């Protein structure tokens, strides 16, 4: 029998082909009281450059505006850039945590609206290929911040690799982002296929970014959802659409999130609508299966620690 780490490597090696894990059979380990109210949401995509980081930051700000305590973890390891987009210069990053020089709490910086930011460390080759035990240590250290957050948003890199899959599989809520480009859609579907092979019950919501019209958004959602129902036997939830808007690029250049510099823009309103949708949907199943403890436990059980 293959060990869990080998299965992880198989998934990576086989690309969009899926390898079945047995993680779900360990889910009874997962739900405990402590920290249970924290929702851990991983934001990911198949293709890069689809808007994950901008979405995560602005969603965090919208949730904070609604009164929630938010922590954003920049888990695009090696190419982290949340600090750049938000205009912060952190003294320490996850690299210091990995090197055991700092604890996670010590590297947290406060961004706008009290949103806590954990910077990822950029341009560091050592962060790109973290071992399984380093990844586990990293998510394990998240326990400490769980109590002080209503939401932990995890911004990942793109595609199918160890770090991304670790955060995707261990979180109980995933936001998958695609743009209308066919390459982005097929890559999103490949990621979806891998997530579903692991856990059919995972809450996966699709966000279509950079649409030109509502119709375009609806047609892409239908396309992906139809394929998912037909071939993967799951329905993917519709989180929403965001318009293509030059405000995003302008805000990146100004290093200020658009929710702050352009609060009344269509795209800011779109983000706020999505934030309220996430809140309103939380009353049902999501809260039951969510929780930081579950997140950690799933990971631990996966690696049989
Ligand atoms: N809704 C949008 N409208 C226009 N441009 C966008 C939009 N979302 C993202 N972009 C552009 O895409 C670039 C990449 O976004 P980013 O959030 O860094 O993507 P990722 O994190 O997925 O790599 C941004 O700098 C911006 O220029
Ligand atoms: Mg990014």
Image (spheres, rainbow, N blue to C red):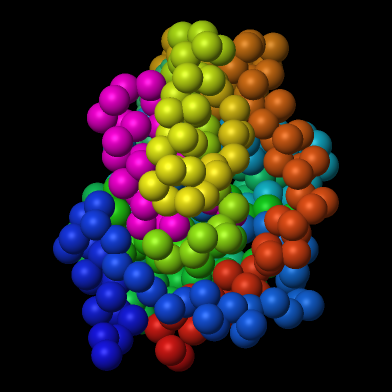
Magenta stretch encompasses residue 23: no
Q: Nearer the viewer, residue 3 or 125?
A: 3
One can see residue 154 in this view: yes
Q: Who's the residue at 78% across and 77% down the image?
A: 33
Seen as rendered, the residue at the extreme left is: 13
Say which quarter of the image contains residue 293.
bottom right
Q: Nearer the viewer, residue 97 or 69?
A: 69
273 relative to 90, above or below: above
Q: Who's the residue at 73% across and 35% down the image?
A: 277
- Find residue 38 and report its horizontal and vertical position in percent: 71, 61
- Magenta region, mostly helix, strand or loop? helix
One can see residue 148 in this view: no
Q: Which residues are magenta?
A: 173-196
- Find residue 268 and report its horizontal and vertical position in percent: 64, 20
- Find residue 271 and report its horizontal and vertical position in percent: 64, 27
Q: Nearer the viewer, residue 89 or 266?
A: 266
Q: Nearer the viewer, residue 286 or 38?
A: 286
Q: Quadrant of ligand 1?
A: top left
Q: Who's the residue at 76% across and 49% down the image?
A: 282
Q: How many discs mark residues in the rendered view?
A: 0
């Amino acid at each position: 029998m293959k060990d869990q780490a080998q299965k992880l490597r198989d998934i990576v090696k086989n690309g969009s082909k899926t390898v079945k894990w047995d993680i779900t059979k360990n889910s009874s380990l997962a739900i405990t009281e402590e920290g249970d109210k924290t929702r851990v949401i991983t934001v990911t995509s198949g293709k890069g450059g689809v808007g994950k980081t901008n979405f995560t930051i602005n969603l965090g700000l919208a949730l904070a505006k609604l009164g929630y305590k938010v922590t954003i973890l920049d888990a695009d390891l090696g190419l982290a850039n949340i600090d750049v987009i938000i205009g912060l210069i952190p003294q320490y990053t996850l690299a210091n945590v990995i090197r055991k020089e700092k604890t996670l709490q010590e590297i947290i910086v406060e961004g706008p609206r009290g949103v806590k930011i954990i910077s990822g460390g950029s341009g560091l080759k050592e962060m790109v290929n973290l071992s399984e035990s380093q990844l586990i240590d990293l998510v394990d250290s998240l326990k400490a911040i769980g109590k002080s957050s209503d939401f932990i948003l995890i911004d990942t890199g793109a595609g199918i690799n160890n770090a991304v899959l670790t955060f995707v599989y261990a979180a109980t809520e995933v936001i998958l982002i695609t743009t209308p480009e066919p390459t982005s859609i097929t890559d999103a579907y490949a990621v979806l296929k891998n997530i579903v092979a692991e856990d059919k019950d995972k809450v996966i919501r699709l966000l279509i970014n950079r649409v030109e019209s509502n119709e375009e958004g609806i047609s892409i959602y239908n396309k992906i959802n139809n394929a998912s129902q037909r071939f993967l036997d799951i329905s993917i939830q519709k989180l929403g659409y965001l318009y293509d808007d030059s405000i995003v690029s302008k805000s990146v250049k100004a290093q200020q999130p658009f929710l702050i510099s352009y609060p009344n823009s269509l795209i800011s309103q779109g983000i706020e609508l999505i934030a309220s949708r996430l809140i309103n949907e939380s009353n049902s199943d999501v809260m039951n299966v969510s929780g930081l403890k579950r997140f950690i436990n799933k990971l631990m059980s996966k690696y049989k620690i």
